[in-house]
Image (tube, rainbow, N blue to C red):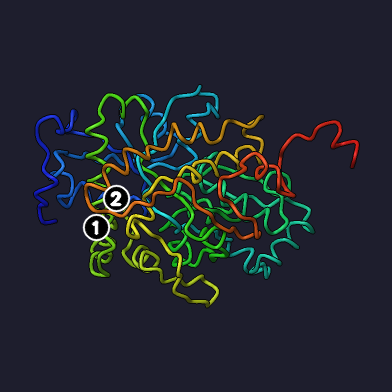
Amino acid sequence: MPSADPLAWVHGSDAPEKPLLELGFMALTDCAPLVVAATQGFAQPYGLSLNLRRQSSWAGLRDKLLSGELDAAHSLYGLIYALQLGIGGAGATDMAVLMGLNQNGQGINLSSALQRKGVTSSEALERFVHQSRTKLTFAQTFPTGTHAMWLYYWLASQGIHPLHDVNSVVVPPAQMLAHLQAGRIDGFCVGEPWSADAVAQGQGFTLATSQSVWPDHPEKVLGCTRVFVEQYPNTARALIQAILAASRFIEQSPENRHSTAQLLSGKTYLDTPVSCIEPRLLGNYQDGLGNQWHDPHALRLHDEGRANLPYLSDGMWFMTQFRRWGLLQSDPDYLAVASQVQQLALYRDAASAMGVPCSEQNMRRSQLIDGSWWDGSDPAGYARSFTLHALAETPAALARR
């Protein structure tokens, strides 16, 4: 249990308008801040009670967010932006990213069958894909989700077009191993612990991590509808503070990470052995090919607030990839959309009250696996800069080919 911070107690006009919240989460290691906040006493000092509701698929979580059955949720960055932009046929809904929940910590795995054929490197995979008479099938967890974007970006960086050279299918995270064992897929991109679980069960190997695609990349967020923030601003602020407090606690010591892994392993949450959760939560990897390492960019849930600040450029990046892969037929106003979705002022207000450091910058600069730099300065140009893409070419461009 955390010690009560006298500054955290709320009263009067600052009290949450809605003290009991329904929070959705998926069975993934990076749901840890919600689980710890709800079960270890981090919500009560902020006037909240959190009821956790595990979801079986991202599509189901999305639908319950939209219906109001869930107040907020452990969400894919791209899911929130797809809803904002009306991608997927459900119509556009104003959404909000309250904070980042984590950076890094997802895995790209290949099957044992490919391993037996000697496809154990990116170069071997590229050769196999272009020489094989049948297309390999890769799974990701949601069409606009982070795992789809990491998979697509990584494949493209290896010279494999993710929409032409391979098949892509959607599989809920906890079902990846069953699909791999049944031979329905040849590989996948998913959040932990399912990548580590596949390795532990001898079902293939981890070929790449998402942090090898983009070190310290944005990943899950605390998402909700904009209506929720507008109706319950004190509640939204208190929720950020409760989740931030839990995130900070988890990373205070290896012992806290260990106790978190034990908590997550329970049937209510991940229902997976601690041995499949804890090593990669601590940054200790073994890939199933005999390689072991401590990853300097492993899963980060807080990192002195750096993992939690909802930078505008993080949200904008996902829109550039939607454009790149044809999910958007024209360029949105990237900065305007991100400024609406990312609740930067609310986050900074909540974090500052807790003494959590907040960068004054709204953008950050990063280099990705293909050598490209992303800083949010020219999103439309960035979306068009890639050799492999699904953008429709103009007649003039086609004439020059």
Amino acid type of disc 2?
Tyr
Which residue in the structure is indicated by mark 2? 269
Residue found at x 53% / y 65%: 206
Query: Which secondary structure, mark 2?
Result: loop
Query: Which secondary structure, mark 1?
Result: helix
x, y percent for residue 320 = 60, 41
Residue found at x 14% / y 29%: 13
Residue found at x 51% / y 71%: 288
N-terminal label among 1 and 2: 1
Which residue in the structure is indicated by mark 1? 263
Residue found at x 44% / y 59%: 105
Depth check, front residue: 151 or 380: 380
Rendered image: mark on residue 119: none
Residue density around tag 1, few if under 14, some if 14–19, many if 20 or more, within 10 Å: many
210 with respect to 98 (left or right): right
In the rendered image, the quadrant that contains the N terminus is bottom left
Q: State the CA–CA distance, disc 1 to disc 2.
A: 8 Å
x, y percent for residue 62 = 42, 33
Question: Where on the picture, by quarter, is residue 75?
Answer: top left
Question: Where on the picture, by quarter, is residue 207?
Answer: bottom right
Amino acid type of disc 1?
Leu
x, y percent for residue 156 = 68, 53
> Is any atom of residue 8 visible in this view?
yes
